[in-house]
Amino acid sequence: MVKKLTIVTHIIAWAIAAIWIIPFLGVFMASIRPFNEIRNGWWNLHTFTPTLEGFFKAERYLRTISLSRSILNSFIVAVPATFIPILVAALAAYAFARFKFPTRDLLFLVIVLLQTIPQQAVIVPLFNITKNVGLFNTYIGLILVHTAFGLPWIILFLRNFFSTLPVEIEEAARIDGASYWKILYKIVLPMSLPALASVIALQFVWVWNDFFFALILIQAPQMKLSTQVIATMATDRFTLDWNMISAASITVMVVPIIIYAALQRYYVRGLVAGAVKG
C-alpha cells in the first residue's frame, strides 16, 4: 500500500513538473528558432533550424542600453535588496522569537498585516517620498523600497524558524559568557542555513523579477533594469520579434534558475520549517 502511494505521488509530482516546464520549453524553442518555424506551434519539428540570432539582436536592440548592461543593473539592485533586509530581519526575528517585551505580540501582528499591503496602494506616496528626499531615479531608492517590502515576510519567516531551534544550546552559550550578538551570529544563524537559503532564493527572485517598482522609480534609459528592457522590446509599435523577445527572456531567466539550483539543497527544508511553525 505504501509503495503504491509512493508511485502515485511520484506520478503526480512529475505531471506537475511537466506542466510547469512546458511553457519554458516553448519560450526556449522560440528563442533558438526563426519565427516561420514556430508559426504553427513550437512543437512542430518538421523543419528545425537552430540559431542564436535572437540573442544577438536582443543584446543590441536598444541604442541607450544593452541587455547585458540591464542585467548588470538588475544585479546592482537585487543583491543588496536581498541581503540588507535579511540582516535587519534576522535581528528583529530573533528578538520576537526569544525575548518578551511589552506589545510584542501586537507589534508582530502589525508586521504580519503589513504583508497584505499591495504595491499599487502605496506607489504614489513612495514616488513623492523618493522624489522629495532625492532618491528618485536612483538605485538606492529602489533598494530601500524593496527592503521595506521584504522585511515583514522575512521577519515572519525567520521568527518561525528560530522558534523551532533548541533553546538549550543558547542557554549553554549564555552560561559560558557569550553575548546575545555572539549567540545570534555564531550559533543561531549557522543553524538556520536552510531558512536563510530559502529567504535568499525567494527575495532575490522577487526583486529580480520586479517590474512595477522599477518602472515607476527608475526613468533614466541607461539605468533601466532587465525587466524594463524586455518590456520595451515587447511594446514596440512597429515590430514584434518573438525570437528576440524569447531570447532576452531566456537570458534574464537563467539567473534565478541558477540561484534555485544552487540553493535547492536547503530550500525545501527551510521553506517548510519557516512556514509551518506559528
Image (cartoon, rainbow, N blue to C red):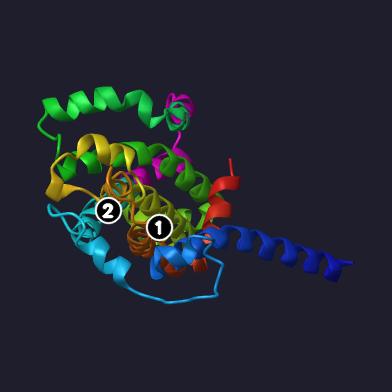
Q: Main secondary structure of the magenta part?
A: helix
What type is the residue that disc 2 sits on? Ser
Spot occupied by residue 42 in the image (x, y as percentages of width and height) = 52, 64
| Mark 1: secondary structure | helix
- 259 or 238: which is nearer to us? 238
Q: CA gap, disc 1 to disc 2?
A: 32 Å
Q: Is residue 151 left or right of residue 145?
A: right
The answer to whether residue 112 of the structure is visible from this angle is: yes
The answer to if 102 sits in the magenta stretch is yes
Spot occupied by residue 39 in the image (x, y as percentages of width and height) = 48, 60
Q: Against 84, is 126 above or below?
A: above
Which residue is label 2 attached to?
Answer: 226
What type is the residue that disc 1 sits on? Leu
Label 1–label 2 contact, CB within 8 A: no
Q: Where does the magenta region start and end?
A: 88-109
Query: Which of the two discs, 1 and 2, labels the residue nearer the N terminus?
Result: 1
Q: Is residue 71 left or right of residue 106?
A: left
Q: Against 171, is 217 above or below?
A: above
